[in-house]
């Protein structure tokens, strides 16, 4: 497990505390300024009566320095990366746009397209996702949700009877996907068009430009690469995945959003700061300073 420091400049206090500890250790006059203001005979009498705790004074000084060291380390922010944290889910998301037109659902590649879609959903981990289906019109089947298991089940139920509108208009699905990203305030997302490639034209390319302008990437899952699907993915800044590339799709969706968010100065959202837990032992050391000896 790799531990990093979020605010390492606080560690500059540690050398100063080490110097203070050395000075305290080398001082022969462990009573501080009391030896300057008290009569030596009276101080000697107090020592003989056991009223002078020289060792205790030095010990309390070391306890105070140890507590200060723990506070400095806590302020430095020792942290570990949270790869599965849900705290940044609103920054990153995936919108699946599924072609449910008759040309897609009645083709021999329909089962493979659904399988790749479910495989991609299973790889999202904590990334939320939404599902849009389209034919002659586009519909939001599942809004942005972290319950990707249920989304995968919904995707598997899509069939030829799902969309009542005949035709294949991917530009409507892509336009709706861009709206979903905007409503969810996603900073770095992915739009995945799962299609047989029919209906891709200038309107779809225009929608791809708008998706890319939002900081998202548009990729295409299709039975085989065609000039239209390749151009669409290139315009949207994504990739084309063909049947059988389930693992490549899963790897792409599993890692694509994090790097882009980190480049936008949001890295602290991915770290679990453990510094606060170091304050507890520091507090215990401070409490020991207030311990009173019972006569």
Image (cartoon, rainbow, N blue to C red):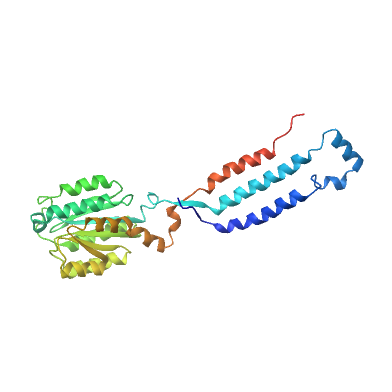
Q: Position of residue 287 (x, y in %)?
A: 65, 39
Q: Nearer the viewer, residue 192 or 90?
A: 192
Residue 189 quadrant: bottom left
Residue 139 quadrant: bottom left
Q: Position of residue 67 (x, y in %)?
A: 64, 46
Image quadrant containing the C terminus: top right
**Total number of numbered discs in the rendering:** 0
The residue located at (55%, 54%) in the rendering is: 76
The residue located at (38%, 60%) in the rendering is: 261
Q: Nearer the viewer, residue 65 or 261?
A: 65
- In the figure, is residue 57 to the left or right of 269? right
Q: Nearer the viewer, residue 240 or 174?
A: 240
- In the figure, is residue 18 to the left or right of 28? left
Q: Position of residue 116 (x, y in %)?
A: 20, 54
The residue located at (31%, 48%) in the rendering is: 146
Residue 139 in view of the camera: no
Residue 114 in view of the camera: yes
Residue located farthest toward the top when viewing the structure as drawn: 295
Q: Position of residue 149 (x, y in %)?
A: 25, 45
């Amino acid at each position: 497990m790799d531990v990093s420091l979020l605010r390492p400049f606080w560690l500059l206090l540690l050398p100063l505390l080490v110097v203070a500890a050395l000075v305290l250790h080398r001082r022969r006059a462990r009573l501080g300024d009391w030896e300057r203001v008290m009569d030596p005979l009276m101080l000697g009498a107090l020592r003989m009566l056991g009223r002078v705790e020289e060792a205790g004074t030095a010990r309390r000084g070391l306890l105070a320095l140890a507590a200060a060291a723990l506070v400095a380390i806590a302020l430095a922010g020792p942290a570990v990366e949270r790869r599965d944290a849900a705290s940044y889910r609103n920054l990153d998301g995936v919108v699946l746009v599924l072609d449910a037109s008759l040309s897609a659902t009645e083709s021999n590649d329909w089962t493979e397209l659904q399988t790749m879609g479910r495989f991609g959903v299973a790889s999202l981990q904590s990334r939320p996702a939404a599902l849009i289906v389209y034919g002659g019109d586009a519909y939001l089947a599942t809004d942005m949700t972290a319950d990707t298991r249920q989304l995968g089940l919904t995707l598997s139920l899509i069939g030829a009877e799902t969309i009542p509108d005949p035709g294949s208009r991917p530009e409507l699905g892509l336009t709706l996907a861009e709206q979903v990203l905007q409503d969810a305030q996603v900073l770095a997302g992915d739009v995945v068009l799962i299609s047989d490639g029919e209906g891709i034209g200038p309107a779809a390319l225009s929608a791809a430009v708008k998706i890319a302008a939002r900081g998202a990437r548009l990729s295409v899952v299709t039975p085989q690469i065609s000039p239209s699907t390749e151009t669409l993915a290139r315009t949207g800044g994504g990739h084309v995945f063909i049947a059988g590339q389930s693992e490549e799709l899963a790897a792409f969706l599993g890692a694509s959003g994090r790097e882009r968010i980190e480049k936008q100065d949001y890295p602290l959202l991915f770290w679990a700061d453990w510094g606060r837990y170091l304050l507890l032992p520091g507090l215990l050391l401070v409490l020991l300073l207030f311990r009173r000896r019972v006569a």
